[in-house]
Amino acid sequence: MHDLKPLTPLGATEPRVDQIGPIKINEIVSVARATVAARHGAEQATRAALGQLLGVAVPTPSRYAGSEVSAISTGPDRWLIEAPIETHEDLARFLQGVLGANASITEQTDAWCRFDLQGDGLPSVMERLCAADTHQWQGGEAQRTVIDHLGCYAICRDASSFSVLGPRSAAGSLHHTLITTCQSVF
């Protein structure tokens, strides 16, 4: 029998935490992800069902909403859903049960890596990372952007907490970029 052990996107057995000046960078591995795309003619039903699941209205483009289960708008009637992996390990199947034939759902948990950045001075870091106008962000904003030639999402959880989602296959490069950018600011 195989003795397989899960590894983080950075290839370790435990998530990495880095502190550069006032900024803490946490590798997040406790989240399951799936994409939801409303099918033609079922857009309103999909928005209503997702709103019930989130406990708030579904986010519109460039927005993020929710708490335990959250959604990032990725386009018209399309969302990337996040939930704790402890309670939603099979998030895609769970969403299929909630949405039925109204939406197309794709498992995304291992396709993305996530780094949370916390601390004072984050807009100065983010402005060096991507083209998003993060100085104006207060919480609830999310934008698809390019960070070091990688298609990523920048998400503002609140004024002193940002998340960066990037392709898991480039987690090392993305982490290096976050570290060196923080070092250039602080």
Image (tube, helix red, strand yellow):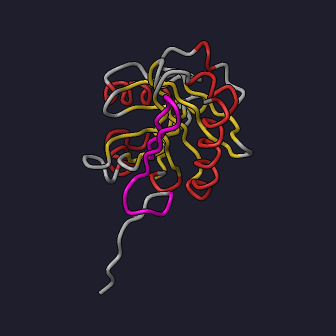
In the image, residue 105 above or below residue 76: below
Q: Quadrant of the C terminus?
A: top right
Q: Residue at x 39, y 50 (%)?
A: 29
- Left or right: where does residue 131 sit relative to residue 56? right
In the image, residue 75 above or below residue 175: above
Residue 178 position within the rendered picture, expressed as x and y whole percent measured from the top left: 60, 41
**Viewer-proximal residue, 145 or 17?**
17
- Left or right: where does residue 185 sit relative to residue 28? right
Residue 51 position within the rendered picture, expressed as x and y whole percent measured from the top left: 37, 24
**Viewer-proximal residue, 36 or 39?**
36
- Left or right: where does residue 10 sit relative to residue 184? left
Q: Residue at x 41, y 19 (%)?
A: 57
Residue 179 position within the rendered picture, expressed as x and y whole percent measured from the top left: 59, 43
Q: Is residue 38 visible?
A: no
Residue 83 position within the rendered picture, expressed as x and y whole percent measured from the top left: 35, 40
Q: Quadrant of residue 181?
A: top right
Q: Which residues are magenta?
A: 10-27
Q: Is residue 175 visible?
A: yes
Asked if the magenta segment contains residue 116, the reply would be no
- Left or right: where does residue 27 sit relative to residue 84? right
Report the number of discs: 0
Toward the left, the furthest residue is 87
Q: Residue at x 43, y 24 (%)?
A: 65
**Viewer-proximal residue, 66 or 135?**
135
Q: Residue at x 47, y 39 (%)?
A: 19
